[in-house]
Image (spheres, grey):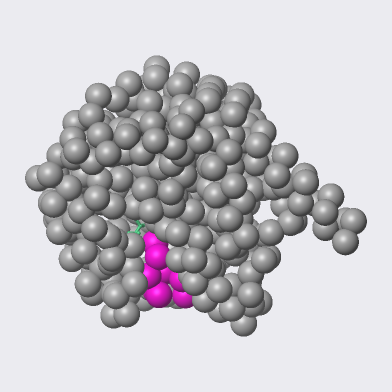
Amino acid sequence: MTNRNATEEPIRFAYWVPNVSGGLVISTIPQRTSWDADYNRKLVRIAEEAGFDYALTQIRFTAGYGAEFQHESVAFSHALLAATTKLKVIAALLPGPWNPTIAAKQIATISELTENRIAINLVSGWFSGEFRAIGEPWLDHDERYRRSEEFITALRGIWTQENYTFRGDFYRYTNYNLKPKPAVTPEIFQGGSSRAARDMAARVSDWYFTNGNTPAGVRAQVDDLQAKAAANGHTVKVGVNAFVIARDTEQEARAVLQEIIDHANADAVKAFGHEAKNAGKASPEGEGNWAKSTFEDLVQYNDGFKTNLIGTPDQIAERILALKDAGTDLALLAFLHFQEEVAYFGEHIIPRVRALEAARAERAEAA
Ligand SMILES: Cc1cc2nc3c(=O)[nH]c(=O)nc-3n(C[C@H](O)[C@H](O)[C@H](O)COP(=O)(O)O)c2cc1C
């Protein structure tokens, strides 16, 4: 299956907003990335100019992988939208602290204020210590997804239906009429790779966001996801995480990766790995994010090294096409020095990807 996106749409690009401190690697390697507002406003303009379609902000209440300081995701997303005109910003929401009514109202207002450029990433939680710290009960893995699915169903219902009534186990609404409703229903992304995550995406999400992986690993997930979605009559797109290290030679790029790993903050990596694997253990089939991650993988906390966008611009462009062949619609990217490297990606890699896509389309037409 799945040459679904091999020739159709151009692959989309998103970047991780560094709205938490410490960058996107758990390493003491010097980074010019900053988590502050001015840095991020400049970065989002660079990304928009470079041809990125989306920026994804993170939700975090306590340090989890380093990330000692954190700006709140929805508020920060709004600030980035106010600094741009084209790109969409994906704000993360966590069931528990958020409920669908608050989220529906808050996101509808931001949508109205920003030409419908806000989207959301519904995360289900992996960090029990954080839930404890903020006074939220910690549900079992699959229960978290049952709640997330109700959240998405209710959120979309409130956004799109008059006098919305819903009777779930976690949320209940009676004749609720959101006014005004968003003019364009915001896209709903969802983070998580377990079977429960795929099952939920195959029923209700617009986008399935997964951790870094090889094209074969992505394809296995996509095949399962798309078979289930087809059976449900549902359409879902796929985004894959990757950490990009683009240098003139592959050797230089690999040396940077080695330096990041050599400077890993070992205690923080192990503490993160412990929490993440523990959270996934309750996932009965053992396929959740991080289930198979090594210490080195965890240094990029969403397994971004595994995707191997590490090398020369030509190598990276080819590997992005391989991800696309595996059924990926969007590459979600992180970098060591965000401002410089996002600009470089826009200048050297996106045009190569577009050229490869155009060449394929020509070949397909000629065939
Ligand atoms: C692209 C992506 C972004 C995510 N963003 C966040 C986030 O900002 N905050 C958070 O607590 N969890 C985040 N998660 C974690 C997921 O919501 C989920 O809890 C985690 O992937 C474990 O799920 P699994 O065991 O079902 O795979 C993200 C996951 C992915 C793949």
Residue lying at 76% horizontally and 51% vertically, measured from the top left: 360
Ligand 1's quadrant is bottom left
Residue 210 picture location, percent across and down: 44, 58
Is 127 part of what is drawn in magenta?
Answer: no
Outermost residue to the right: 366
Residue 130 picture location, percent across and down: 18, 51
Q: Is 272 left, or right, of 152 in this rendering?
A: left
Is 192 part of what is drawn in magenta?
Answer: yes
Q: Quadrant of residue 114?
A: top right
Instruction: Please name whichever residue, 55 or 60, is drawn nearer the observer in this view of the structure.
Output: 55
Instruction: Please name whichever residue, 94 or 286, is drawn nearer the observer in this view of the structure.
Output: 286
| Quarter in which the N terminus is drawn | bottom right
Q: Quadrant of residue 244?
A: top left
| Quarter in which the C terminus is drawn | bottom right
The image shows a total of numbered marks equal to 0
Residue 278 picture location, percent across and down: 18, 66
Segment tinted magenta in the rendering: 190-200
Residue 283, relative to residue 352: is it above or below?
A: below
Residue 78 picture location, percent across and down: 48, 32
Q: Is 120 left, or right, of 258 in this rendering?
A: right
Instruction: Please name whichever residue, 251 or 203, is drawn nearer the observer in this view of the structure.
Output: 251
Residue 323, relative to residue 230: is it above or below?
A: above
Residue lying at 24% horizontally and 50% vertically, measured from the top left: 296
Residue lying at 64% horizontally and 69% vertically, measured from the top left: 2
